[in-house]
Amino acid sequence: MEKVTQESEQQAWQGAVEALLPSTPAAAAWPHLASFCALHRYLSGVDVCERVAGEDGHPGCVRYVASRAAPAPGEEDQDQHEAAPAAIATWAREELLELDDAARRLSYAVVGSNMGFGRYVATMMVVEEETEAAGCKLVWEFECEPVQGWSRDGLVGYLETTVKSMAARIVEAAAD
């Protein structure tokens, strides 16, 4: 019976990561996260984020996100006009499943990618902090099949770094 439990745990990964935005009110942070097709503004490493189907902010909207390969050694020093555009290294198509402004929550699913994802569903939320500070936190929950080439801990580590980077960029944007 123990072996069956371990096998079933390997069939699905789930978890949550979060990042504090100690001086940013939830109402100021939410519009940045809620802009489904503007992920490239808040997620470092995402070079392209564009709507390919549906209407931004409405369930059924599909965004294409991609990251370019790092330039080969020496290429980064070339004149911009001479250097060839960097090739797309990774990409995904993600469908918005839910966007709830009142709850400050959105859910999406990866519907195609070259990154080893099978089923992947995530929920991102902006949660009001219940302390004296006027801040909030970003919460990124996920449930997925094991991802090819990743461990669960590796995925969680990547998402922890990513959500903290997003939080820092949202803090900057909300302050403007």
Image (tube, rainbow, N blue to C red):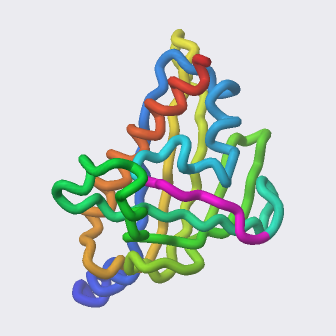
Q: Residue at x 27, y 81 (%)?
A: 6
> What residue occupies the far top of the structure in this picture?
132
User: Residue drawn at (69%, 41%), measured in percent from left and top?
Assistant: 104
In the displayed structure, 164 sits above or below 156; it is above
Q: Nearer the viewer, residue 10 or 155?
A: 155
Q: Position of residue 47 (x, y in %)?
A: 48, 55
Residue 148 vs residue 64, the one in the foreground: 64
Answer above or below: position of 38 versus 129.
below
Tell me: residue 164, above or below residue 81: above
Q: Give the dominant element type of the magenta stretch: helix, strand or loop.
A: strand
**Residue 119 location (% of width, % of height):** 51, 79
Residue 166 is situated, as x and y percent measured from the top left of the image, at 47, 40
- Residue 27: quadrant of the picture: top right
Pick whichever, 37 or 100, lies toward us: 37
**Is 48 part of what is drawn in magenta?**
yes
Residue at the image position 66 percent from the left and 25 percent from the top: 28
Query: Quadrant where the N terminus lies?
Result: bottom left
Question: Percent from the top left, x then y, of residue 140?
Answer: 49, 50
Asked which quadrant contains residue 10, the reply is: bottom left
Is 113 situated above or below 64? below
Q: Is residue 120 magenta?
A: no
Q: Give the residue furthest to the left.
A: 73
The stretch of residues the image draws in magenta is: 46-53
- Does residue 70 appear to the left or right of 87 in the view shown? left
Quarter occupied by the C terminus: top right
Residue name at image x 42 percent, y 53 percent: 81
Q: Quadrant of residue 108?
A: bottom right
All told, the count of numbered labels is: 0
Q: Depth check: give the residue in front, 95 or 13.
A: 95
Q: Is residue 119 left or right of residue 164?
A: right
